[in-house]
Amino acid sequence: MTSMRERVEELTALRESVLQGHDPAATRRQHEKGKLTAHERIGLLLDEGSFREIEPFRRHRAVGFGMEDRRPHSDGVITGWGTVEGRKVFVYAHDFRVFGGALGEAHAEKIHKVMDLAVAAGAPLVGLNDGAGARIQEGVTALAGYGGIFRRHTRNSGVIPQISVMLGPCAGGAAYSPALTDFVFMVRGTSQMFITGPDVVQAVTGEKIDMNGLGGADVHADVSGVATFAYDDEESCLADVRYLLCMLPANNRELPPAAPSADPADRPTDALLHLVPADPQQSYDMRAVVAEIADDGECFEISPTWADNVLCALIRMDGHVVGVIANQPASLAGVLDIRASEKAARFVQMCDAFNIPLVTLVDVPGFLPGVAQEHGGIIRHGAKLLYAYCNATVPRIQLILRKAYGGAYIVMDSRSIGADLSLAWPTNEIAVMGAEGAANVIFRREIAAADDPATMRAQKIKEYRSELLHPYYAAERGLVDDVIDPRHTRLTLIRALDMLRGKHADLPSRKHGNPPV
């Protein structure tokens, strides 16, 4: 009879063989492509020694096409949990060395289990994606496996943070899994996402393009907006996944983790006096403003290269996580367009889902005019941002730096749509439109009839500005709670956020809303 010691030695040997992989050549090929193995990636993501694997010995039960003779342990996906900075995180990682990371029935069931465990434990889920899509040899059972993943992503949305890290190819229906998660990280050169590959595209449309040109990291980070971040290597990518996890709560029942800050709450922000020109026509970089009010100037920008006329970022203020939405005058003068509206709306929804307060920095000349914008549905897309703000119950503070014109002023979290506090600098201009445009409309006849139209126009612009665009007009009517010295911006916001930290607001009883999509 086999002894317990011999059984344990057998178990140890089996575990080691599973860890090393059934084919050393496959590991070598993975490294030659500049890619890490699934276990190596998990080692970079999680705290050292914290990973606990589940179902390492799982094997598929498929028959036909030679599958019954190829039954490696793990079935091409590593699942389990560990910690990031001591906080629990669940993870699954496709193992490209086994069936190219393709998803079959057993593979999918392992992912289903870890997703269910993550939501039951109330902890974030990170998917390290490097797979060739559905396992063709298993037919419809593989497709059903994807359906189970999609359903769980949707059910878990807004309950636990869900992060997708693209570290290899992701084709067909598999691309919808990361699209359903909160954040998508990609690595240049090695990760791609597309519904139909280059060969199919060429056959159907005649367009010739390679995999990276069709669905590479920069394409999705800069053009489509599918990817939140793009990196040059896996190490820096996974380091930022760890950083992001440290900014997010474990689930929707908790507040984001606070951290002690050595940056004084009452630190003056004198630099804002010269960072932001008083002239509303002059441009500046809003990133510098955000850095000035953030603890130690640290800012984790979301989708920094897509729709960059609006800035979305996670920062800390007095150690507490805050979501910042800001117009970016350095790009398209900070106007709102289709992409900016979508980007900001999704960020507002994410922050609201995970109890992250919102600070909105406003310097917006309006919505971008044009036939392409109107035909592209700027009304519908702009309504996404409006809906997201109106639906948000977290603390919300609006700060108007300079101009805030027309519908864009309302959409950027004005008091009228539910901001808890609206603050402004003495350079604020809040109106239906700028003084020049308003004068041309209101005083059109007087200007046309004048002996010197240019002088008359300048006079009327000055008159309109003095009557309706002076910095205290909105404050006099209760639409701005206070006009503040820019040098006190950081302290004022920190005090306001502290006052609102215990905010509780209930939405009407309903199954769910019907937001514009």
Image: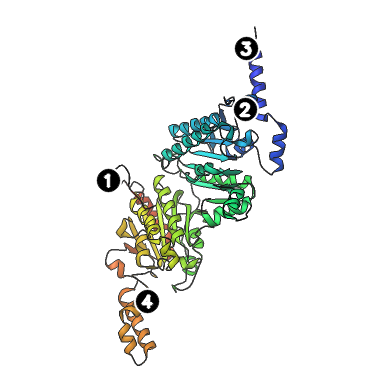
Residue 268 lies, with reference to residue 126, above or below; the image says: below
Q: Earlier in the sequence, mark 1 or mark 4?
A: 4
Q: Secondary structure at mark 2?
A: helix
- Mark 4 to mark 3 CA distance (whole Å): 87 Å
Which mark identifies residue 67? 2
* Comparing labels 2 and 3, the label whose residue is closer to the camera: 2
- In the image, what residue type sits under mark 2? Met
Q: Secondary structure at mark 3?
A: helix
Nearer-the-camera pick, 515 or 499: 515
* Comparing labels 4 and 2, the label whose residue is closer to the camera: 2
- Mark 2 to mark 3 CA distance (whole Å): 33 Å
Whether the residues at callouts 2 and 3 have beta carbons within 8 Å, the answer is no
Give the labeled residue for mark 4: 437
Nearer-the-camera pick, 347 or 77: 77
- In the image, what residue type sits under mark 3? Met
Give the labeled residue for mark 1: 508
Residue 63 lies, with reference to residue 43, above or below; the image says: above
Q: Earlier in the sequence, mark 1 or mark 2?
A: 2
Give the labeled residue for mark 3: 4
Residue 102 lies, with reference to residue 274, above or below; the image says: above
- Mark 4 to mark 2 CA distance (whole Å): 71 Å
Query: Mark 2 packing: few (<14 Cα in 10 Å), some, or many (20+)?
Result: few
Residue 471 lies, with reference to residue 398, above or below; the image says: below
Nearer-the-camera pick, 7 or 484: 7
- In the image, what residue type sits under mark 1? Pro
Q: Is residue 493 left or right of residue 112?
A: left
- Mark 1 to mark 2 CA distance (whole Å): 53 Å
* Comparing labels 4 and 3, the label whose residue is closer to the camera: 4
